[in-house]
Image (cartoon, grey):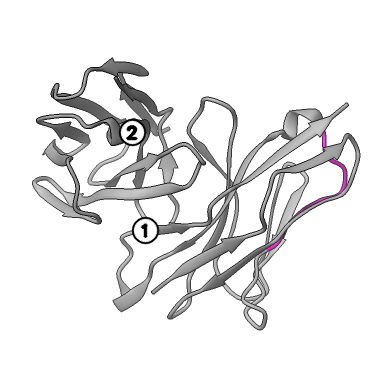
Amino acid sequence: SQTIHQWPATLVQPVGSPLSLECTVEGTSNPNLYWYRQAAGRGLQLLFYSVGIGQISSEVPQNLSASRPQDRQFILSSKKLLLSDSGFYLCAWSKGYEQYFGPGTRLTVT
Amino acid sequence: GNSVTQMEGPVTLSEEAFLTINCTYTATGYPSLFWYVQYPGEGLQLLLKATKADDKGSNKGFEATYRKETTSFHLEKGSVQVSDSAVYFCALSDTAGGTSYGKLTFGQGTILTVHP
């Protein structure tokens, strides 16, 4: 069966510091991968998606970037965090129309 | 573009009450429709889905019917439990151009609290 991992589970970072969140998927190959942010108020915003290694599409301009160095690895990064980057970051994968979500990373920028 | 509108929350019910969470959508083409549930501090879990008009998705006592004529996908449960307390998201898939990227458009979510 397929599983999706995210780490760290929680993170507290100062403004201006770098960020790296990692997501890996097991049990499938060549999945579509997604990064979402869920700010306070619970709505989900799609940040990036990827249909293959090195292929990244950005949905909204922002302070963040994504990379897919391996087939089942998806990384969300920032060079300098802003207060507004705080939120709950969710990674997801799909092979069709259904998406399956990881447990999330709670990021607090102080 | 695609959009999903859910009823405003929060919704507060007593155990064994009937639940309805309204969801309507706007989409080009023929989207698939989903309900996801998020328990506190966790990621989203797929609750049920419907891929074409008049399909009924069901799981764990929850049901929703894909109504193309009213562009709706309302979530219902006949008798809620305290353990159903969570945030519920309606979503639709993006199939524009025949792609199957699986990009989802989410509603804003509805908080459900069930009291004993």
Q: Is residue B78 magenta?
A: yes
CB under 8 Å between discs 1 and 2: no
Q: Residues within 10 Å of mark 2 (few under 14, many from 20)?
A: few
In-image side of B86 versus A34 (left or right): right
Q: Which residue is drawn at 79% across and 40% down?
A: B12
Is A104 drawn above or below residue B23 in the view shown?
above
Residue A47 x, y percent position in the rendering: 28, 48
Q: Quadrant of residue A110?
A: top left
Q: Which residue is drawn at 34% across and 75% down?
A: B96
- Mark 2 lies on a secondary structure that is loop
Q: Which of A21 and A62 is in front in this view?
A: A62
Classified by dominant secondary structure, the portion drawn in magenta counts as loop
Is B77 drawn above or below residue A69 in the view shown?
below
Which mark identifies residue A100?
A: none
In-image side of B81 versus A74 (left or right): right
- Mark 1 lies on a secondary structure that is loop
Q: Name the residue under label 1.
A: B102
Q: Which residue is drawn at 33% across and 50% down?
A: A46
Residue B99 x, y percent position in the rendering: 30, 69
Amino acid, disc 2? Gly
In-image side of A78 versus B1 (left or right): left
Q: Viewer-nearest of labels 1 and 2?
A: 1
Give how far apart the Cα atoms at labels 1 and 2 are. Answer: 18 Å
Give the chain of mark 1.
B
Q: Nearer the viewer, residue B90 or A42?
A: A42
Q: What segment is highlighted magenta in the picture? A: B74-81
Q: Does the magenta stretch include residue B41?
A: no
Q: Mark 2 points at which residue?
A: A27
